[in-house]
Image (cartoon, rainbow, N blue to C red):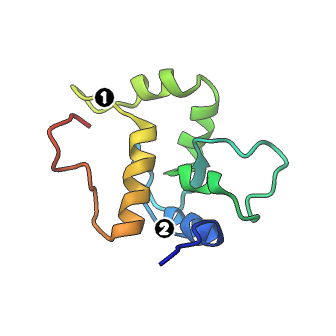
């Protein structure tokens, strides 16, 4: 059975937008694209880049764009842990596909 992911990319953004912010946990988030779609590009169009989206509230979304990914991940990492935004994006995609929340939560790696 062939699955057409591209046709589901906008549905995936809806899934992301109901999640809490990865940093502060508030609801009412932006779908931040780790693989940027670029200013002026229409996020309402089908795109595989939508599958790189993570939920960030407006404040953290704005803060992300100031220092960039490396500084952001260090600044907002939980105490004693590392924050990997691409790993979070993959985890959310796998949750959407499988229905299993936090698929990386049970592995031996540190989050």
CA separation in Å, label 2 and label 1: 24 Å
8 or 64, which lies in front?
8
Residue 67 lies, with reference to residue 51, above or below; the image says above
Q: Is mark 2 on a helix, strand or loop?
A: loop
Residue 21 lies, with reference to residue 95, above or below; the image says above
**Where in the figure is residue 14, as x and y percent of width and height?**
56, 69
Q: Along the horizontal axis of the image, is 73 left or right of 80?
A: right
Q: Along the horizontal axis of the image, is 73 left or right of 45?
A: left
Packing grade of label 1 (10 A; few <14, some 14-19, many >=20) is: some
Residue occupying the point 46% across, 61% down: 27
Residue 5 shows in this picture: yes
111 or 107, which lies in front?
107
Packing grade of label 2 (10 A; few <14, some 14-19, many >=20) is: some
In front of the other: label 2 or label 1? 1
The mark that comes first in sequence, 2 or 1, is: 2
Residue marked by disc 1: 82
Residue 25 shows in this picture: no
Residue occupying the point 43% across, 28% down: 73
**Where in the figure is residue 71, as x and y percent of width and height?**
49, 21
**Where in the figure is residue 38, as x and y percent of width and height?**
77, 42
């Amino acid at each position: 059975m062939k699955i057409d992911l591209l046709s589901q990319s906008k549905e995936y953004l809806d899934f992301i937008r109901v999640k809490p912010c990865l940093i502060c946990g508030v609801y009412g988030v932006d779908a931040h694209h780790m693989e940027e779609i670029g200013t002026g590009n229409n996020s309402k169009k089908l795109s595989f880049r939508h599958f790189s989206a993570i939920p960030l509230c407006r404040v953290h979304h704005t803060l992300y764009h100031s220092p960039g990914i490396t500084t952001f991940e260090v600044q907002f990492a939980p105490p004693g842990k590392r924050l990997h935004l691409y790993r979070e994006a993959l985890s959310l995609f796998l949750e959407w596909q499988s229905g299993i929340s936090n698929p990386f939560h049970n592995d031996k790696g540190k989050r």
